Image (tube, rainbow, N blue to C red):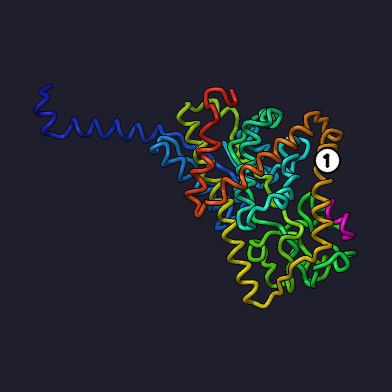
Amino acid sequence: MNCPNMLRRGVLPAILAGIAMSGAVEAKQLSYATGYSTGSIGAKAAEVFANDVEDHSGGDLTAKVYAQSLLSFSEIPPGIRDGMADSGLVLTPYFPSEFPSTNLATELTMLIEMTGAPTEKVGLAFAGAMAEYVFFNCPSCVNEYEQQNQLFLGGGGTSSYFLICNKPVRTLEEIKGKRLRIGGAQWARWANVVGATPVSIPQHETYEALSQGVVDCSVHSAPELTIVKLMEVTSDMTPNMPGGVFSGLANNINLDVWKSLTPNERSTMLHASAAHASALSWGYAQAAITNMKTAEEQGIKIHEPDAGLVKVTRDFIEQDIKAVAAKYAETHNLTSSAPLVESFRTLLTKWVELVKGVDNSEELTQVYWDEVYSKVNVDTYGQ
């Protein structure tokens, strides 16, 4: 064959183009499942994750997001375990037996109230502390994920939880006897201590429960004012009471899939997970600020808790630390529970300082990456 003629006729460029197309076909695509609905803060964070996978890998690795379609939140852990999804967002408190070491830390969220953290940044700090805790301070956490044929890649944290009510609740006297919708064991224990009654109601049923007086208040974060439309049935709110965040968020990957990736691809997944944690946590923080402003403009009364209620709550938090350690030692035979609690408390204090100067999601991603995610050894983690 005459090579110059081949070049003139465009055959060689065509061959090269075919090679390029072959490379594109061979790009790996991973499925990502989330129980968040399309357009929600969580679904948008999932898209940030997918975009970062593609950008960081130069297109050699991609992720396709399935928002509230492939698997529900209750189906995601077994779905990842069995390979129905390559990766996804796991709500660990829904699975107390499977992830006890992780859930021990998620029940310590009210500790953030003892650190002096700015209200708008509590979730940012908690997300960083949770990631560092699982990756480096909690071998039993890593083991329990591996037992479910998956691996933790990161987390996230909501904005502060507080009293969203249909009547004023500012004092110990006013809270006694009130029925409170709660979304975590720590808030249920607090409700009992202050003389209220904790009620377990799914989030999507909170609107009706509050509007019909089935509950007097919901312990929720400010974004739920619009996510669940609680703004329409709320007359009074008491921020910073009881406090804490929801942080039982684990961005997980199927263990077999992780092992099939190259070291560079694993690093890509970790970087994308740092971006996801940032987008989720920052998204909740910003939505909280916006919703609180809107609530005030619409005439919802915003109260400060009185000193008596604050003191009882602070005393409860200190005592509950010991109770959580004892509970997990007894219920889950977690013999390392006390050291894990102290370890997490130290990390949380550290992360409150780390996020204080963060002004946007991009800066937060960089802090998460520099301080935690980049330090995970991709040659040994999960191997």
* Residue 299, position as x, y percentages in the image: 67, 78
* Residue 198, position as x, y percentages in the image: 85, 57
To which quarter of the image does residue 28 belong? Answer: top left
For badge 1, the amino acid type reads: Lys
To which quarter of the image does residue 325 belong? Answer: top right
Does residue 31 appear in the picture of this structure? yes
What residue would you read off at disc 1? Answer: 322
Q: Is residue 196 magenta?
A: yes
Viewed as shown, does residue 333 lie left or right of 12? right
Residue at 42% in and 36% down: 57
Q: Is residue 36 magenta?
A: no
Please determine whether, in this image, residue 124 is positioned above or below residue 25: below
Count of marks placed on residues: 1
Please determine whether, in this image, residue 343 is positioned above or below residue 166: above
Residue at 9% in and 27% down: 4
Quadrant of the drawing holding the N terminus:
top left
Quadrant of the drawing holding the C terminus:
top right
Please determine whether, in this image, residue 292 is positioned above or below residue 79: below
283 or 347, nearer to the observer: 347
Q: Residues within 10 Å of mark 1 (few under 14, many from 20)?
A: some
Viewed as shown, does residue 285 lie left or right of 115? left
Q: Looking at this rendering, what residue extends furthest in the bottom direction?
A: 299
Residue at 64% in and 56% down: 159
Residue at 67% in and 47% down: 247
Does residue 84 appear in the picture of this structure? no
* Residue 102, position as x, y percentages in the image: 71, 37
* Residue 210, position as x, y percentages in the image: 78, 68
Q: Which residues are magenta?
A: 189-197
Please determine whether, in this image, residue 28 is positioned above or below residue 35: above
To which quarter of the image does residue 78 belong? Answer: top right
Label 1 SS: helix
